[in-house]
Amino acid sequence: MELFTNQVLAGIATGAIYACMALAVVMIYQAIDHLNFAQGEMAMFSTFISWQLMQWGVPYWWAFLLTLAFSFAGGIAIERLLFKPLAKAPILTNVAGFIALYGIINSFAGLIWDFTIKQYPTPFGSSPFLGSQLISTHQAGMIGVTVLLLILLFLFFQYTRIGLAMRAAASLPESARLVGINTSWMIALGWGMAAAIGSIAGILIAPVVFLEPNMMLGVLIYGFAAAVLGGLTSPLGAVVGGFLVGIFENLAGTYIPGVGNELKLPIALALIITVLVVKPAGLFGRPIVKRV
Amino acid sequence: MTAMLNVKDLRAYYGQVQALHGLSFALNEGSLTTLLGANGAGKTTTLRAICNMVRSTGAIEFEGKPLSGRSTENVVRLGIAHVPQGRGTFTTMTVEENLQLGAITRNDKKGVVADIERMYEHFPVLKERHTQQAGTLSGGEQQMLAVARALMLRPRLMLLDEPSFGLAPLIVRELFKILGKINREDKVTILVVEQNAQLALELADQAYVIETGRIVMSGSAAEIANNEDIRKSYLGY
């Protein structure tokens, strides 16, 4: 039983990271109807920025905040320079854009910081949380930061004017323009926020997976699985999906013989395919209906 | 009276297809004008061209300012509210959020709160349903909400695209009564596009008749309504 509880709690901790990645993916998907394949690389680059800042002597939380600001600006810049011009382009052109972005960021990170694995600090420490053997303080910190982030995002979208405008722009762009909302900037803002959320995921997971240019590949695939499971049209679904996938991943790795660590990624991919076949809209998404 | 909106030689295109062929008309400040015509005559396109939602050429001036080259949201910010065909309701949001969105460009918080209350007086049914998801409202209620949302902008000019579409006759009468009241009391200039010519002519003081992208007739609403030839050939009643 203790093994089970242990695995569930650990699953919630990594699930928090998947939830962040899934949320970032869903925010951009809501805004432009495309999956951002480079979301993980953007997060990885941000994490390197924070690491570099700490190498230069900036304290952890200052580096954290500066990195958020950098990611936010970077997300907006990527949208303005690359994806705004592609807004009316066919899907494949956009996919090519995302893959190019993936490659560019990955190579640049390798060029600047090389591909060796680096230790990444945790501000929470790795001792057992509150003396219990079930969960470490860093895992508890991952959950805590994510929950705080989710609450702040909820308040932002529910109670601020700009949050309302962003929701309107994502749900009905034409109507949004007709009440005077600059939908183009709302999309850019969505990119900025998604990049910042992704960077939080990167910074929190870096002490676990270690810092290197390919660190986010697995995390992003789990993020996609979470987003698909929860429904690509539902931010709440993305979050719930993230936690579910985290728990599922851990339990499958523990209890299904032969899965272990090596087969964890195929499990995420199998999950994506299963959801797409059985319930394409996901748990919380609305089915996409098109008049023909 | 000076013309508030001046449209000259308006041509609009959907891809290669030309939908408007040199339309010219003017709206006087404070007037309630109706644009009549059959299906596909170009009524909706005319409204969309004013808000720069279709590719168009020609000159449109609002209170002396040219509208060409402005994005839709910047046209709206000049005080032109557009109630689109199909109402454009934010169906997943609450009634109150829809009203707040109508005022999203305004910075006077107190004024917005007061205006929401004013809308609830105009449309009591919206107050009853203010926490409800707008998508759960009936067609008539959604049309009321769309008009209320447009008024939240405190517009100088309101464009309405077939507000009677899909509504029961009684509800249409009620809606038109409210539009007349808004025009008189709030001094909002109104341009309403309608297929329901009879009702629109009762409400309006000016009328234009449009056919295949051209204005074929204009005059006071009474003149048009009393001209049997026009009625039979263009308005079908």
Image (spheres, coloured by chain):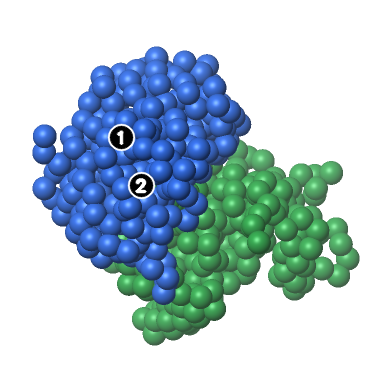
Q: Chain of mark 2?
A: B
Helix, strand or loop for disc 2: strand
Nearest the camera: A96 or B104?
B104
Q: Residue at x 53, y 24 (%)?
A: B171
**Which chain: blue?**
B
Residue type, label 1 = Glu
Q: Is residue A180 above or below residue B114?
A: below
Q: Chain of mark 1?
A: B
Contact (Cβ within 8 Å) of mark 2 with mark 1:
no
Residue A99 percent coordinates (x, y): 51, 79
Query: Which residue carries the number 1 mark?
Result: B223
The total of numbered circles placed on residues is 2
Nearest the camera: B52 or A246?
B52
Residue B150 percent coordinates (x, y): 36, 35
Query: Which residue carries the number 2 mark?
Result: B209
Q: Residue at x 56, y 48 (%)?
A: A235
Q: Residue at x 36, y 37 (%)?
A: B227
Q: Residue at x 75, y 71 (%)?
A: A266
How many neighbours does mark 1 have within 10 angstroms: few (below 14), some (14-19), or many (20 or more)?
Answer: some
**Which chain: green?**
A
Residue type, label 2 = Val
Picture quadrant of residue B186: top left
Residue A185 percent coordinates (x, y): 33, 56
Picture quadrant of residue A264: bottom right
Picture quadrant of residue A35: bottom right
The residue at the far right in this view is A257
Residue B121 percent coordinates (x, y): 39, 14
Q: Is residue A172 visible?
A: yes
